[in-house]
Image (cartoon, rainbow, N blue to C red):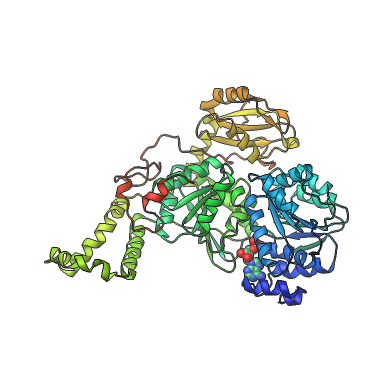
Amino acid sequence: MSTFSELGLKEEILSALIDMGYETPSEIQEKAVPQVISSTDDLKAFAQTGTGKTAAFSLPIIQQIDVDNSNVQAIILSPTRELAVQIGDQIEKFSKNIRGLKVVTVYGGASIEDQTRKLNKGAQIVVGTPGRTVDLINRRRLKLGNLQWLVLDEADEMLNMGFKDDLDAVLQSTPETKQTLLFSATFPREVEAIARNYMHNPVEISAGTKNTGSDDVSNEYYVVTERNRYAAIKRIADVNPDIYGIIFCRTRRECQEVSEKLIADGYSADSLHGDLSQAQRDSVMQKFRKKTVQMLVATDVAARGLDVTDLTHVINHKLPDQNEAYTHRSGRTGRAGKKGVSIVLVTNREVGKLRPIERKIQKKFIKREVPSGTEICKIQLFKLVEKVKNTEINTEAISGYLENIYSEFEGLSREELIQKFISVEFNAFLEYYSKADDINDNRAPREADDRGRRRDDENMSRFFINIGRKDSLTPPRLMGLINDQNITNNVEIGQIEILDTFSFFELDKNFEKETIEAFLSNSPEFEGRSVNVEITKKRRSGGGGGRGGDRRPRRDGGNFRGGDRGPRRDGGDFKGKRRESTGGNRDRESRSSGSSSRVQNKSWGRKRD
Ligand code: AMP
């Protein structure tokens, strides 16, 4: 293992790294830093998030920046605003001892004038999201004529998110002589095409096994019915009172629903997704980083690349559409040498979907039982006892009352007194879980599968849509388009099949008419084409294409529900005052404060500012 100074970095950078606590280079840094310092060859790097790739591309660039020249010399493109800001911050830290080096971060959703002003003052390094970068180039506010380095960070994700045209535009407006550094966790066709079209004989490096999960992450799954997903999350939070984690959802709506329920049920949670303004996203992230929010409910896109080092848990509320995304999700925990747990909630018929993920991460999922009410109560009770034991007594403040209090309790034994104090805090919790059912779905898979398949066949209508892969349509973009039509609250989307020039999607049969009407009256456009939707014949079970370009039949595939609209047979998993699964702000006052992942109500009831 080498040291940072052996990689050829200069003193100013080395001292900054020491201040940041970086002692030895990570594998990708060991490979990339000397390569980029000593050669102008393009670089193609396989690297997942969490491997230290930000420093791997930033350090050699910072080392070589000409600080006497205020032109833009390096541009780093990253898929999301959060990731761009994170990279910009890191570069500022790495270069804090280099006088005259300036970095500016540009992204949508924030004032373009402010960003232009900063650019006008001169910056050698620009970090940007593709859309805003192209916008600034077109307005001639960002000039890349002197560019020496172009970094494409998380190239696969940028393409997944539909930034291909923007990437093409940036790549075409930069000088031929620049050095291109492409970092990607995966190399699907589209990324290879970028490498082929815009890079010259790139040197290839990789860190660790491609696309495998971290050894520091334990991958676990719980089998529950669809309507008990939320109840399971609550139990996981209750059995881990110090949980600090991200709950991943597939859509903004799912995200909003889960977080609203958690907040209403008194947990310390908030949501992060694309519908929030930049200021809201910043505020949520700030609270999460400061740990005033314990559970961040996020979409894949919003949480991509987020660097929060000591997450204890990642929870997959539903499996991602693409297996690849699981690696990114689970990679949010188990970072910087810490241990973490990545939990997947699956229905009985989804268990089979874990196998291809296991092959990808080269690790087995461990089956866990959703904790019972008794287990949760035991853990919460001892947490409360610990809290009491560790509470400091402010004698001065209470001394004036003590005499009266002692006389009130006269006649109670020590044991009785302890029991009463514990009960004050804990009764509501005990009541809440005392009659809790077992919510593990232990039915044989076939039994569950039959039910699911019937639902797929009977309750879904198939729609034709006149746009496809050639229009850069992807399953997430199609879901976004459908959601944008506001057909009705919580409409369920089933299988999606994207073909070259047209596509199909399934949607809850009860909303056939509303779907057609919504598309007709909104007349949406997609990539400049008017969108046209028609009802089509239902594909026979087991036939036809797959989803998102996967051509294998997917009978079981990818249904997601925007919410639990089905008949509620018994609601949650307990029969006390509260039910677990529908959220809503019922019975708030009876909530226990025994759990530290639950918050005292006031601050969480209010809307984000
Ligand atoms: P990245 O993959 O660049 O997002 O980095 C993941 C995390 O590891 C970040 O918190 C970095 O600050 C941290 N990190 C990266 N390289 C090192 C290193 N050589 N030593 C210690 N921490 C590092």
Image quarter for residue 67?
A: bottom right
Residue at the extreme left of the image, as rendered = 411
Ligand 1's quadrant is bottom right
Question: In what quadrant of the picture does the N terminus appear?
Answer: bottom right
Q: In percent of the image, x 72 and y 77: which residue is there?
A: 2
Vertical arrangement, residue 98 with respect to residue 6, above or below: above
Work out whether residue 262 or residue 173 is closer to the camera in this orientation and state it: 173
Q: In percent of the image, x 26 and y 55: which residue is there?
A: 427
- Residue 422 % position (x, y): 26, 62
Q: Is residue 284 left or right of residue 500?
A: left
Work out whether residue 159 or residue 373 is closer to the camera in this orientation and state it: 159
Q: In percent of the image, x 62 and y 70: which residue is there?
A: 20
- Residue 294 % position (x, y): 47, 56
- Residue 397 % position (x, y): 27, 67
Q: In percent of the image, x 68 and y 67: which residue is there?
A: 96
Q: Is residue 220 visible?
A: no
Q: Is residue 371 visible?
A: yes
